[in-house]
Image (tube, rainbow, N blue to C red):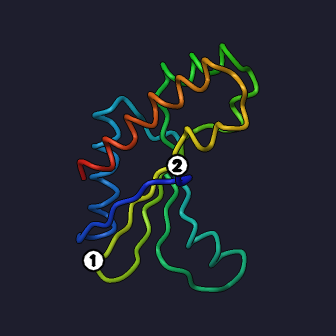
């Protein structure tokens, strides 16, 4: 099983971010962080990089349940969703596969939460 799942869209970068945010919201996720990686790379290294945004998606109910079961699970949160401009109006959306990401955590409750979150993330990406 892959550590992420993805989908390609023919749209603008801004529209893709809006669509991803709405799809995630429909599955109970909020965006709690947003990192503009191409800007960070330009500022720190002085090199140009394709538009690359990391959205930190969080479903508070699932996060709470996982943190109750395993209080250090926060090092694995939030769920990252990428918006990458691969070409003109060619956008790739990629989301972490939480089942794969949490494999090293040997906790049945966390595994169950990861499976449920993975289903919701995949549904959000698939509906784009």
Q: Is residue 86 above or below residue 27?
A: below
Q: Nearer the viewer, residue 84 or 110?
A: 110
Query: Which residue is drawn at the image coordinates 38% and 67% (left, top)?
Result: 92
Q: Report whether 7 appears left or right of 4.
A: left
| Number of marks in the rendered image | 2
Q: Which residue is mark 2?
A: 96
Q: Which image quadrant is residue 99 in?
A: top right
Q: Nearer the viewer, residue 35 or 67?
A: 67
Question: Which residue corresponds to mark 1?
Answer: 89
Q: CA distance from mark 1 to mark 2?
A: 23 Å
Q: Earlier in the sequence, mark 1 or mark 2?
A: 1
> Could you tell me residue 45's position as x and y percent?
72, 80
Q: Position of residue 97 (x, y in %)?
A: 51, 45
* Residue situated in front as seen by the camera: 102 or 29: 102
* Residue ranking furthest to the top: 68
Residue at 72% x, 75% y is 44
In the image, residue 70 sits, relative to residue 75, either above or below, namely above
Residue at the extreme bottom of the image, as rendered: 47
Name the residue rendered at 51%, 39% in the picture: 32
In the rendered image, the vertical position of residue 86 relative to residue 3, given as above or below: below
Disc 2: CA contacts within 10 A as few (<14), some (14-19) or many (>=20): many
């Amino acid at each position: 099983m892959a550590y992420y799942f993805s989908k390609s869209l023919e749209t603008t970068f801004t529209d893709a971010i809006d669509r991803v945010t709405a799809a995630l919201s429909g599955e109970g996720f909020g965006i709690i962080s947003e990192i503009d990686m191409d800007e960070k790379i330009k500022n720190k290294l002085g090199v140009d990089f394709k538009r690359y945004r990391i959205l930190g998606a969080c479903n508070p109910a699932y996060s709470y349940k996982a943190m109750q079961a395993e209080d250090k699970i926060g090092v694995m949160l939030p769920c990252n969703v990428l918006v990458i401009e691969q070409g003109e109006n060619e956008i790739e959306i990629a989301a972490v596969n939480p089942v794969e990401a949490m494999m090293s955590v040997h906790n049945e409750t966390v595994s169950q939460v990861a499976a449920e979150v993975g289903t919701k993330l995949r549904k959000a990406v698939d509906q784009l």
